[in-house]
Amino acid sequence: MKLKEVFAAAAAALIGAVTGANAQEPLKIGAVLEVTGPFASIAKQIENGMRLYIARHGDTVAGRKVELIIKDSTGAQPDVAKRLVTELVTRDKVDFVVGFGLTPNAMAAAPVVTEAKVPTIIMNAATSVIVSKSPYMARVSMTLPQVTMPIAQWAVKNKIKRVYSLVSDFGPGLDAEATFKKNFTAAGGEIVGEVRTPLKNPDFGPFIQRIKDAKPEAVFIFLPAGEQGISFMKGYRERGLAEAGIRLIGPGDVVEDDILEAIGDSALGVVTTHHYSAAHDSPLNREYVKAYMERFKIRPNFMSVGGYDGMAVVYEVTRKLNGKIDADKAMEVIKGMKIDSPRGPIQIDPVTRDVVQTVYVRKVEKKDGKLFNIEFDKFENVRDPGT
Ligand code: PHB
């Protein structure tokens, strides 16, 4: 063979290899997560949930090898998130965009995935409005109004009349504040004071003192999962709010499973409403918690379940579409989809593309010497009520 022919043969072989590979191209899933910075624990739980799903269900679906590409938004950084999503859809040409611990990052992604037409699964970010911002978004986690409305009803039923509200000053906190206020006051409750704390580096001390001085029967609280709950609960203990007869109520983020042991016994008796507890009593959840703890050596929280169920959606869509992902067809498959989740059965609302689920009432108690949110009542088929 002449040199020219050798090149031609090599080129042909290369093209053949590439076309052959086409049929088997990896299923690319691009995740935007807060991997570093103050919200890293959120990202870790979501990533763990995704990886556990892949480990338990195989890394190939409809003949395509699953490839997870994780991009670090480094915190509540909408500009960074927007750039990363743009890279994922233009350069990496991902089949799905997933992730989003935090609302500002999910909001920044909406116009990009709409323009690029890429199905996008929100695995945590929980401000009500997010999924309405793109027809290519669906959510498997929760919305703050969805998990807050039940605690407002529970509080009234349990004769709590005067409440001080403290929320983190960003989307989900504002949703929680508005939902609690609306439902609690409509049923005859009174908000005796309210405060919004900064998302970055909050110092809760002065706020906690103000709450104590106002002598409410309870403090309603929403803080993002992770460190902030530990720090708030420390102040609550140190300033003697429980001794002053001030109860703590809210959606479950402030006593989520990943931080309960770090908070310690001052969490005992706290009643919250939420969609997931590691203590949820079902065979599926027991298996989930066991597999998760064996693999990652920490307790799974609701964020991990968002990651896990989000991957269940990706797998089901890929199977139904025989591996050929078309955004409009994918959304049709997602609408109305039912998933058997470790939290119990959930469904994606066919109209809003938001999650419909049971919200549980739970109290922090000791089980086998460890602190857990023990579910004792529930509200079934709760949709996002909006704000
Ligand atoms: C959100 O950014 O939407 C968010 C963050 C942490 C939570 C809940 C919601 O615990």
Image (cartoon, rainbow, N blue to C red):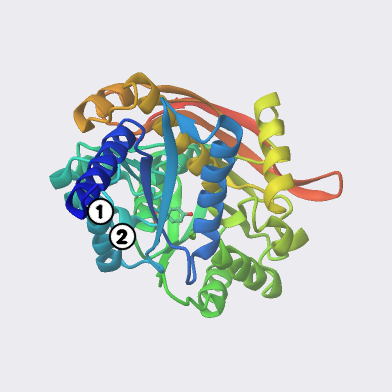
Is residue 190 toward the left or the right of residue 278 in the image? left
Identify the residue shown where x is 49% and y is 57%. Answer: 43
Ligand 1 closer than 8 Å to the CB at disc 2?
yes
Q: Can residue 271 be seen here?
A: yes
Classify mark 1: residues with Cα within 10 Å, few (<14), some (14-19) or many (20+).
Answer: many
Write down the residue under mark 1: 109
Report helix, strand or loop for mark 2: helix
Identify the residue shown where x is 44% and y is 36%. Answer: 65
Residue 80's place in the image compared with 29, above or below, is: below
Is residue 62 toward the left or the right of residue 158 in the image? left
Residue 16's place in the image compared with 3, above or below, is: above
Is residue 286 toward the left or the right of residue 118 in the image? right
Write down the residue under mark 2: 104
- Mark 1 residue type: Ala
Q: Position of residue 139 (x, y in %)?
A: 36, 38
Classify mark 2: residues with Cα within 10 Å, few (<14), some (14-19) or many (20+).
Answer: many
- Mark 2 residue type: Pro
Residue 148's place in the image compared with 23, above or below, is: below
Judged from the image, the quadrant occupied by ligand 1 is bottom left
Q: Mark 1 against mark 2, which lies toward the viewer?
A: 1
Farthest right residue?
368
